[in-house]
Image (cartoon, rainbow, N blue to C red):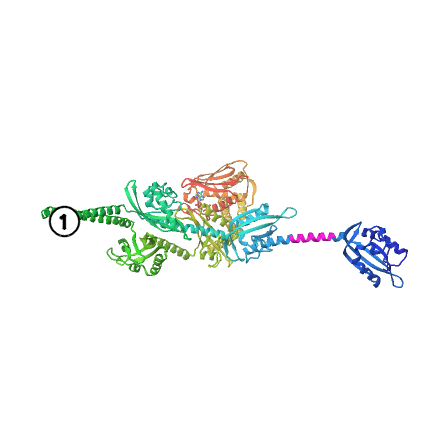
């Protein structure tokens, strides 16, 4: 639109909703200004109207003067869109945002005569927009921060959405725990089916239901790395928190998980290492307890950390009383204790072994002399961490040495005297005779001294013999190898163990030659290693005796011996004959092997479950029953999962009861093969096995296949069902015919005919009840026996049955003591058939003329019915079996009584399906009472 000059223009300007100011194009003097313009400009009317535009807006001149001049010259409008501008409004500098137009107004000739300035302030909108922008960036930043925490967190984090616990978010650390598994978007128990049935499933569901946070530490979960893969035992610590929606309703679970398998493994390794060191300790103890020398170890605070049995028995103390105590506390005198403490200090400093001799009065043995060696024990950094010592009682040796010294002094004196005497002899021949006499006396003394010397040597030899005898008593062979000369010194027992005579010499090579060939290399290597590399030497090997050709299993234990300087110089050891123990172990192993072979040969599947960690060890045959390949890993849960769903829970419960309560597991159940889908019926039998200490360690079981039998049973049942069903129809017609005939014969004169018809009626009824029995059996087996419960009066039912029986049975007296108003909720027909069966058994199995007594009453919240007869009764062993299917007592009495052994079986099934009980009390030859009880209505 183009404006033209005149009144219209002024009005339009004044009323316009945006700021307008009209300038003269030549002078740029404001000729018209509306209120809105003044409002935006923030200046009074007079400051603009009638003034040069750039005087009024001096602060904006340098920015827009050029643009305005351009409009005047070119006749083209100038647009400024949302520009930031500093204006002096109401005397103050203000930054504002405006959108404005410099629009040329032309006359008819097209010359620009005026400039219209249109202006609109946007400050508020722009600031609002900026604020929104800042807030948006802040939110975005916060979200990024959270996201990067989530993605980088070292713990596995995931969010499970909704009641189905669908993986909504999974951070890399979580995915890392299960690298090959697809998780996102899948419900957890579909993505990780191995969790189904574990405690974790219950926990997750409970957390979701209750909203309570939950923490589990070091939980063992067997998980597979990729779907369907083999599971591995891993340990995790979990933390679950619920997530709530804006209405505070739970809508998910936040899971934090750390894998701690590594930590647990370290703990287990530690435990193993501890056990090994314990074992080491036991070996050392065995070795040190056999020697008469005193052996001990001090810590750096002079406390005993070890004392062998010889030392303990010298002190008269127990290990626990002595170890951990210092010298004084163990009864050493102060001078003696201080001496050793000084020596320990010295060893700490020099790291050198030292040797000493000490002598002190012993409580019972008198004064004793001891020779001892203290040796530093160095740790892996070469620092002294303890001081080990051995002490030997050398009193005897000392005493003889002293006597010897004394004697040689005497000898010396005598010699001197002799010299003097000789001199005197030269000087005086007269004294020769007496000197000769003295000489003789001296010779006597010499002989005496020699004698004493001999005895001393004998004594020393004797004490060695005693030591040897002690070792011989233990029946160990002992040996000694000098590590440099390799001289091999053995005792007679050792020679005997290698089949040598005591007087023969035996070299190392000869001994090794007696070891059987397959062990010789191994033993030689171990021995070399022990001598030259300070290795362990504890080996078991078979030896064939040289002369006696006997096979012996020997165990040899050896260790390096340090000489007083601490250097190693000799290797000592002992050898024991462990043939008997070894063969015993082998025999057990052989027996186990044959048992295993027998199990395999019988086609039995076998398995055992470790009671403590519940690890399942199935045999190959068992895997085959469950439809797995022999090499497949089959954990316990996988096996249980293959059991038919109708039997699965019952089987699992029974195994659990067998493990925890020690009851026997015996159950028949069908299995659906894992790979082949084949249905196999098996009978499983199992029990927990105590170990030699009587602690239950393993649950072992065997399985054999009974599919064939099961199929036979089904076929048999089908056949019985079919035949019984077919027989029913003609029998029904027969019953009807007999009934009609009976009514017709009522008025007949022929008493034989009416009697015969009556008997025919009874026989047909018996046949019909027998066929019903078979039909029920087949229904029962195919689970089609339905229980249709209603309320009825038990009293009336029994009364009816008793009366009906009286009509057909004249051989016995049936008595009934009514018990009024016993209302029960049960299947009337079926309970009726149970009572009929019990009464007809009483009739069948008791002689004519006897009384049958039927009773009913209430016993402890239950209705109880009993049928008592005075018949042949039942032996105790038969009483348990009479309720079994097809069971009949076989005896001369019963062989002429017809029956199939199904009546009581059916009765028991019916009663059990009513949650009732059935049982018998009986004495052979005197009668039986059959009872059943039902819950009271
Ligand atoms: P059936 O009587 O058809 O053989 P049941 O199942 O009713 O079948 O009984 C099973 C077995 O129990 C009988 O064969 C019999 O040996 C024994 N029995 C049942 N009732 C009695 C009873 N009242 N006295 C002695 N023995 C009985």
Task: Residue 132: say if magenta.
Answer: yes
> Badge 1: how crowded within 10 Å, few (<14), some, or many (20+)?
few
- The percent position of residue 845, horizontal first and vertical second, equals 44, 43
- Which element carries disc 1, helix, strand or loop? helix
Number of marks present in the image shown: 1
Percent across and percent down for residue 378 are 39, 51
Place of residue 245 in the rendered image (x, y in percent of width and height, measured from the top left): 64, 48
Above or below for 816 versus 909: above
Task: Mark yes or no: residue 260 visible.
Answer: yes
Residue bearing the label numbered 1 = 423
Q: Quadrant of ligand 1?
A: top left
Residue name at image x 29 percent, y 53 percent: 477
In the picture as drawn, the residue positioned furthest to the right comes out as 7
Can residue 168 be spotted in the picture?
no
Picture quarter with the N terminus: bottom right
Q: Is residue 714 magenta?
A: no
Q: Between 547 and 760, which is closer to the camera in this rendering?
A: 547
The quarter of the picture where the C terminus appears is top right
Q: For this view, does 326 lie left or right of residue 419?
A: right
Q: Nearer the viewer, residue 865 or 215?
A: 215
Beta carbon at label 1 within 8 Å of ligand 1: no
Q: Is most of the magenta stretch helix, strand or loop? A: helix
Camera-nearest residue between 164 and 137: 137
Residue farthest toward the front in the current orientation of the protein: 427
Q: Quadrant of residue 592?
A: bottom left
Along the viewing direction, whichever of 22 and 887 lies nearer the viewer: 22
Highlighted magenta segment, given as a residue range: 127-141
Query: x, y (%) of residue 438?
Result: 13, 46
């Amino acid at each position: 639109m183009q404006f033209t000059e005149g009144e219209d223009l002024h009005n339009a300007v004044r009323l316009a909703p945006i700021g307008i100011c009209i300038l003269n194009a030549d002078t740029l003097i404001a000729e018209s200004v509306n209120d809105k313009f003044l409002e935006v400009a923030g200046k009074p009317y007079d400051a603009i109207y009638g003034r040069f535009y750039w005087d009024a807006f001096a602060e904006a001149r340098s920015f827009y003067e050029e643009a305005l001049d351009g409009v005047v010259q070119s006749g083209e409008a100038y647009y400024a869109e949302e520009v930031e501008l500093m204006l002096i409004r109401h005397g103050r500098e203000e930054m504002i945002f405006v959108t404005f137009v410099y629009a040329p107004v032309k006359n008819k000739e097209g010359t620009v005569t005026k400039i219209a300035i249109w202006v609109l302030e946007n400050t508020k909108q722009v600031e609002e927009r900026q604020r929104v922008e800042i807030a948006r960036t802040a939110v975005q930043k916060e979200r990024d921060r959270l996201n990067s925490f989530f993605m980088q967190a070292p713990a596995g984090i995931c969010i499970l959405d909704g009641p189905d616990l669908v993986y909504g978010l999974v951070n890399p650390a979580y995915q890392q725990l299960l690298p090959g598994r697809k998780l996102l978007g899948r419900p957890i128990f579909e993505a990780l089916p191995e969790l189904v049935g574990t405690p974790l499933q219950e926990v997750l569901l409970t957390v979701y239901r209750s909203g309570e946070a939950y923490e589990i530490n070091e939980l063992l979960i067997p998980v597979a790395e990729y779907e369907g893969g083999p599971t591995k035992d891993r340990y995790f610590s979990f933390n679950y928190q619920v997530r709530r929606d804006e209405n505070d309703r739970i809508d998910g679970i936040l899971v934090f998980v750390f894998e701690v398998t590594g930590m647990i493994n370290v703990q287990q390794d530690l435990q193993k290492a501890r056990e090994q060191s314990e074992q080491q300790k036991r070996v050392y103890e065995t070795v040190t307890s056999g020697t008469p020398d005193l052996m001990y170890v001090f810590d750096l605070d002079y406390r005993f950390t070890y004392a062998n049995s010889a030392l303990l028995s010298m002190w008269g103390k127990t290990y626990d009383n002595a170890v951990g105590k210092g010298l004084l506390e163990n009864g050493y005198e102060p001078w003696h204790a201080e001496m050793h403490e000084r020596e320990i200090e010295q060893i700490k400093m020099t790291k050198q072994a030292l040797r000493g001799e000490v002598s002190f009065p012993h409580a019972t043995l008198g004064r004793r002399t001891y020779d001892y060696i203290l040796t530093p024990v160095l740790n892996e950094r070469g620092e002294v961490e303890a001081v080990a010592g051995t002490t030997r009682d050398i009193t005897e040796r000392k005493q003889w040495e002293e006597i010897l010294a004394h004697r040689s002094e005497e000898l010396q004196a005598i010699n001197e005297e002799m010299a003097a005497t000789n001199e005197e002899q030269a000087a005086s021949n007269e004294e020769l005779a007496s000197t000769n006499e003295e000489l003789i006396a001296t010779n006597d003394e010499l002989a005496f001294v020699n004698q004493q010397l001999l005895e001393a040597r004998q004594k020393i030899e004797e004490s060695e013999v005693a030591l040897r005898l002690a070792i011989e008593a233990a029946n160990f062979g002992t040996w000694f190898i000098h590590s440099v000369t390799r001289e091999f010194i053995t005792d007679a027992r050792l020679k005997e163990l290698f089949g040598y005579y005591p007087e023969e010499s035996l070299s190392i090579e000869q001994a090794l030659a007696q070891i059987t060939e397959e062990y010789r290399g191994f033993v030689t290597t171990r021995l070399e290693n022990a001598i030259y590399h300070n290795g362990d030497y504890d080996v078991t090997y078979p030896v064939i005796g040289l002369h006696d050709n006997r096979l012996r299993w020997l165990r040899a234990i050896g260790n390096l011996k340090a000489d007083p300087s601490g250097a190693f110089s000799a290797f000592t050891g002992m050898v024991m004959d462990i043939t008997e123990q070894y063969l015993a172990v082998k025999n057990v192993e052989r027996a186990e092997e044959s048992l295993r072979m027998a199990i395999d040969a019988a086609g039995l599947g076998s398995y055992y479950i470790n009671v403590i960690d519940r690890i399942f060890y199935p045999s190959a045959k068992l895997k085959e029953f469950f439809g797995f390949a022999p090499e497949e890993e089959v954990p316990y849960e996988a096996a249980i999962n293959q059991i038919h769903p109708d039997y699965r829970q019952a089987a699992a419960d029974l195994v659990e009861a067998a493990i925890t309560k020690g009851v026997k597991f015996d159950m028949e159940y069908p299995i659906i093969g894992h790979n082949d889908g084949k249905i196999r019926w098996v009978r499983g039998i199992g029990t927990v096995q105590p170990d030699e200490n009587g602690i239950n360690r393993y649950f072992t079981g065997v399985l054999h296949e009974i599919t064939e039998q099961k199929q036979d049973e089904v076929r048999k049942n089908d056949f019985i069902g079919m035949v019984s069903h077919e027989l029913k129809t003609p029998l029904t017609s027969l019953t009807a015919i007999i009934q009609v005939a009976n009514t017709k014969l009522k008025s007949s004169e022929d008493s034989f005919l009416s009697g015969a018809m009556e008997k025919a009626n009874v026989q047909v009824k018996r046949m019909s009840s027998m066929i019903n029995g078979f039909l029920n059996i087949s229904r029962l087996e195919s689970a089609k026996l339905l229980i249709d419960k209603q309320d009825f009066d038990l009293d009336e039912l029994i009364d009816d049955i008793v009366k009906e029986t009286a009509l057909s049975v004249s051989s016995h007296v049936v008595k009934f003591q009514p018990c009024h108003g016993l209302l029960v909720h049960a299947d009337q027909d079926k309970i009726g058939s149970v009572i009929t069966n019990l009464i007809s058994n009483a009739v069948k199995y008791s002689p004519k003329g006897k009384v049958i007594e039927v009773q009913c009453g209430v016993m402890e919240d239950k209705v109880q019915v009993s049928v008592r007869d005075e018949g042949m009764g039942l032996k105790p062993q038969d009483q348990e079996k009479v309720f079994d299917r097809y069971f009949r007592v076989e005896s001369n009495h019963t062989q002429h009584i017809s029956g199939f052994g199904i009546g009581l079986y059916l009765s028991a099934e019916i009663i059990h399906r009513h949650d009732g009980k059935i049982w018998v009390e009986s004495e052979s030859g005197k009668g039986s009472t059959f009872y059943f009880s039902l819950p009271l209505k």
